[in-house]
Image (cartoon, helix red, strand yellow):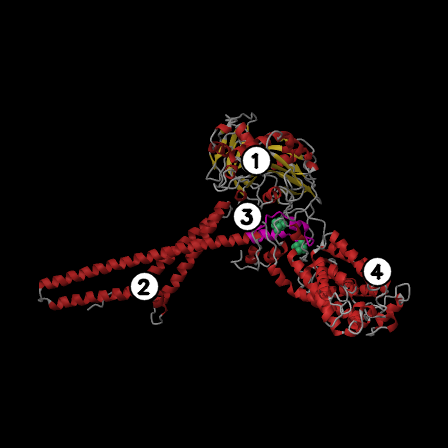
Amino acid sequence: MRKLWDFPGGIHPPQHKSQSNSQPIRFAGLPQKLILPLQQHIGSPAETRVAVGTTVLKGECLAAAIGTLGVPVHAPTSGKIEAISRQPVPHPSGMVDWCITLIPDGLDTWCERRAMPDYAHHPRPEVLARIRDAGVVGLGGAGFPIHIKLQPPERDKVETLILNGAECEPYITADDVLMRERATEVVEGLNIMAWLLEPAHCVIAVEDNKPEAIAALRAAAEDTLIEIVVIPTKYPSGGEKQLIQIVTGLEVPHGGIPADIGTMCQNVGTAVAVYRAIHHGEPLISRITSITGHAVTTPGNVEAYLGTPVADLLRQAGLQTDRLDRLILGGPMMGYTLQSADVPVIKTTNCVIAAARGELPEPPPEQPCIRCGACSEACPMELLPQQLFWYAKAEEFEKAEHQNLFDCIECGACSYVCPSSIPLVQYYRFAKGEIRAHNAEQLKSDRARERFEARQARLERERGEKEARREERARTAAEAQAKKAEQSGNSDGPALDDRAAKTAAVQAALARKEQKAQQPLTAAQSPDETTEPDIASLEKQLSQAQDKLATMVAMLEEAQTSGADNADKLERAVAKNTERVKRAEEALSAARNEAIQPETTPPSG
Amino acid sequence: MTLRQQSSPHTRGARSTAHIMLWVIVATLPGLIVQTIFFGWGNLINVAWCIALAIGAEAAVLRLRQRPLKFYLSDNTAALTGLLLGLALPPFTPWWVSAVAVIAAIVMAKQLYGGLGSNPFNPAMVGYALVLISFPVAMTTNWAAPAGLFQGAPGFLETLGLIAAGKQTAIDAYTMATPLDVYKHDIGALVAEEVRQHPSFGTGVAKGWEWVNLGFLAGGLVLLYLKIITWHIPVSVLAALVVMSLAFGSNQDLYAPLSLHLLAGATILGAFFIATDPVSAATSHQGKLIYGAGIGLLLYVIRTWGSYPDAVAFAVLLMNFAVPFIDHYTPPRTYGHNKARRGIASKSAG
Ligand code: SF4
Ligand code: SF4
């Protein structure tokens, strides 16, 4: 028996699991249309490879992976591409994003599948590439591309590979039923990962509230070196950091990754996806999702094609619209509310809770913090939530950061226990957002300043060079004159004198001008110069305009990457500001020339 | 169909601040009942008076501050402050002395600092310390003799009359100095054996007092069991008291013995119900241990070498002062960090 460790804090919320785990997995069937977001994972969105109107086969790649972190998107069934457009996607902000709409033809015809059951005879990179090409991402959490995770940095040797079957969130039972019904696939998938990583220990960790899953896994893992580890039920035991602590007693260092301490966590569903990709050549095109909550009459787990609208699944489960109070994607502790059911199931959709009124009641109004410490007792990260709250509320973000705000995993244990019903996690999200925004702003303005300064320096240099050239020309001319004078003798003396005087005057003017160019500000400040203050204010205007432009550009970039719908407006604003900067520049150079002009004109004599 | 939008988590535990306060109130009942049995109706009347006054004062200030009355009053915290004062004040404390204490506690120590959660000092103890300093006679001569409710203590109406009369000192026949007081004054001239002849001691540690303290201990254990308080503060208060007593006061002919320190006076009430007031206590476990130990230490020092026979209020208030400092140096070590990050926000700290 493996020695287990405890993690600090944690809570025991009511589980509500029997609602959904008493039925076998049901196949959700083909919906009328599938909506496939190009980004269902962490990393850059996939790039469309099909055109509207194309007929595709089941399993065909619709959008290709971009960048190292990218993964492709596949057709869950055969059919025709109806649209490539922006549609609502599952996201806390209810945003819209690029999606491929596929109308199934009902035939469900597979494309050619290339299985690799003899993976052990292939080079590892080839197997990893297969996994990536199958579009496999972490199915338990944020959807991190698995082929990346399976290639930890050279220096980090994974000693303990942990399959996470804890599923500690109330309501969710997708992994539970998966382990019950597909234990062999879980084990096979784990074998592939183990072959890739060669860990000393392979562990499948399951909370002790899933006896059936444990029995099934034990049977499937017989005669293997895989350890089935039964951990006590306590939220959030399924948090990556907590599970590693439970199984190994080690803590993932702040700012590090599990591989740094020789561990790695993978979700059990991910293992099955890896298994199907390698042994059957099937890309990730479906997943198991719990449809539960009191507002559906037949809660349970369905295997749904990616892209199936949540509304379809709810209808199948017997949604009672009149009872519905809120839709939660994910669990009640960390999930987020949906604005509508018209979003598709994606790779990370593990649960939809259709909560009836009163099922998950609205919290009572927030009361003052009584510093009772219940939150810090519950915090698995050993933070002081009450302190973080205080700083977040007072907008003393630096202090909050110092108190390790960014180590908060937003598990919600603190909010759960807070007797004063303070939405603590909400405050932390707010503070984190503000800090990130501030840092990004800082970075951008630093960059903008650097760019601006570089440009200034270049202009300065160019101007200097121009002056030098002009001076050079003047000097050559003067010399030529002098030579000429020498050559032509003294006969036309006065004329020459006149010319020489003129040249001298030009040179003197140039010298003065150069001096001024080098210290335009000092000159501008001297009160007897009437034209100069104009330059200073113009310069200020210019730099202001440039700053503004830089922020605008930054905002536009951000808006474009996050797909916010104000991008057009920002684009126009940027154009306008560019115009403004140009005008300011022109005005400034005009003013500068003017300021210099009267002196450059040699005293006519 | 409009769907409710809410930030996670979507569920919460059943506990509320009002419940917690109510439980603390309930947990004092064993002590209060024993107190009444041994020392008569005085404390019960004080408790009722102080609670009523505390709620009234809180309501008045809330109205002035234009806060919703029902929302804030229903948190039960004012009642708890009143209750603690009623338990701590001598049984025959004149009504107006109690009133000064309660008003100081609610208006000055709590509401003027911004209300619940913002008060750096334990409100009940501010009130208590204020009247102890201002009215030393009323606060030392009004302790009831441990006559027993059924044996000679004045009846309910008579007690009520005494308190309502508002005289600084009640009738001699009913009052008696506390054992801690007696020991402190007499041990200079007498040996332990002789001191203990005083009627306030009885046959046990300190007549009546030992049971009152055990009553509060029972309630305190309930709070521990319900996880309303953690063990850190009470254990460290008592441990520090024990260590100090063993280190300095082992000679009973010179100093009050340990048993008296533990079971006479307000020790247990202080350790379990007063020092554990979360608002004014230290935050982390380590901090709580230091905070509690400080209280235990000060309690012993003031009782032994100071001029007051009991010192829960002063010890707690002094340590309240130290809380920001303690918190500064005792943050917990966060997961994944090598060591705790001290201080507030110096970038160099690791
Ligand atoms: S649980 Fe709530 S009331 Fe208690 S200390 Fe934490 S934030 Fe404050
Ligand atoms: S949400 Fe953050 S602060 Fe709260 S318990 Fe979880 S980790 Fe701790």
- For residue A456, what is the image quadrant? bottom left
Which circle, 2 or 3, is nearer the viewer? Answer: 3
Q: Which label is found at residue A253?
A: 3
Spatial CA span between label 2 and label 1: 65 Å
Residue A363 is covered by the magenta coloring:
no
Compute the Cα span from label 4 to label 3: 53 Å
Q: Is residue A474 left or right of residue B135?
A: left
Q: Is residue A412 magenta?
A: yes
Disc number lying in front (3 or 1): 3
The answer, for residue A366, to whether it is visible in the render is no
Q: Nearer the viewer, residue B183 or B36?
A: B183
What residue type is disc 2 on? Gln
Counting residues from the start of the chain, the first of labels 3 and 1 encountered is: 3
The circle on residue A270 is 1
Q: Are marks 4 and 2 on the same chain?
A: no
For disc 4, the neighbor class at 10 Å (few under 14, some 14 to 19, many from 20) is many
> Considering only order in the chain, which callout, 3 or 2, is on the residue closer to the N terminus?
3
Q: Amino acid at mark 3?
A: Pro
State which quarter of the image contains the N terminus of chain B. top right
Q: Residue A249's spot in the image, x, y percent? A: 60, 44
